[in-house]
Image: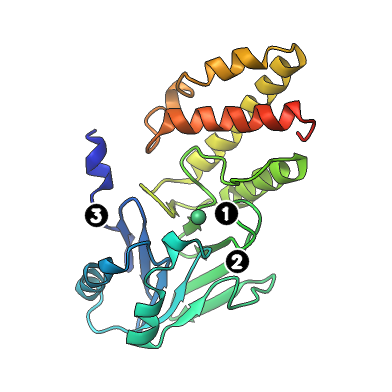
Amino acid sequence: MDAAAVDRPKLLCPVPGCFVRQEVDNISWVDMGSYLLVIDALERPELARDVLTAMESTAPGKPVHALINTHTHHDHVALNEVFRRRFGAQIVNAQTHVVPPAGLTWTEGARRLEVHAAPGCHTDEDLFVWLPTERLLFVGDIFGWGLIPWDHLLDRARFALIISTYCRLAELEPVVVVPGHGPLCTAAELRRWVEYITALLDEVRRLCHEDSAGRLLDAASLAPPEDMRHWWRFVKWKHADSVSKLVYAVTHGRL
Ligand SMILES: [Zn+2]
């Protein structure tokens, strides 16, 4: 496939009444019946008009009651002010709300949207959004198409937390998973990444034990497993980055 085609904005409707403007950065909205809920708010404020036009085309005249940021990195919050000013939308993220163990919920008719906390995979603020009836899951940057989501030093506790969070999300058995960036996927990709990163850690430990971590870092210049080579964007770089993070953690006795 033409790689650039994936990065042009597309308006997707993974289930009726739920929309994703998919690009490098994704913004989504859910039609609750009389109002909309928005998930994530992009990096570039100049996209406001495009986004509002797309929303109007899918749900004419419906106000936005709340905007949920899966976390508050700059590439997820640029339109917060636009929605707040235009609709008086409530801004919901880990800084503005304490998310109770049962989650925050919005319901109208048969539609139910839940926001749950799952901190520590990508940031200490990670939230995910779940529509249990439609089995639609929004994971923000917890899933990064092959990237280790935690961008700081890894240790045993962090690695275990990431794996258990992926398992928790996959066990919801979502039909569609919407990441913060790039194409949509399913629970299969969440499970595949757990297998991949676990096997890679085993390999790193084995080679570090044999004192051949250098050989592994050379191997990092290769692509990841065959079935992951079509994964979205910079797959080779992500693989090399994962190898070097794991080698660092293992050789420093952290993992
Ligand atoms: Zn992020």
With respect to residue 231, does 161 lie above or below?
below
Q: How many numbered tags mark residues here?
A: 3
What residue sits right under mark 2 in the picture? 116
Q: Badge 2, how many Cα within 10 Å: few under 14, some, many 20+?
A: some
Q: Residue at x 62, y 51 (%)?
A: 121
What residue sits right under mark 3 in the picture? 10
With respect to residue 35, does 3 lie above or below?
above
Asked whether 175 or 84 is in front, the reply is: 84
How was this image coloured? rainbow
Find residue 134 and report its horizontal and vertical position in percent.
44, 62
Q: Secondary structure at mark 3?
A: strand
Using the numbered discs, state the Cα–Cα distance from disc 1 to disc 2 in whole angstroms: 12 Å
Task: Identify the image quadrant of the N terminus.
Answer: top left
Mark 3 beta carbon near ligand 1 (under 8 Å): no
Find residue 171 and report its horizontal and vertical position in percent.
60, 49
Three-letter amino acid code at the position of disc 2: His
Using the numbered discs, state the Cα–Cα distance from disc 3 to disc 2 in whole angstroms: 27 Å
Q: Residue at x 68, y 30 (%)?
A: 248
Q: Secondary structure at mark 2?
A: strand
Q: Badge 1, how many Cα within 10 Å: few under 14, some, many 20+?
A: some
Q: Residue at x 59, y 27 (%)?
A: 243
Three-letter amino acid code at the position of disc 3: Lys
Quarter of image, res 126:
bottom right
Camera-nearest label, 1 or 3: 3
Left or right? Give the position of 213 relative to 80: right
Residue 172 image label: 1
Q: Badge 3, how many Cα within 10 Å: few under 14, some, many 20+?
A: some
Left or right? Give the position of 29 relative to 218: left
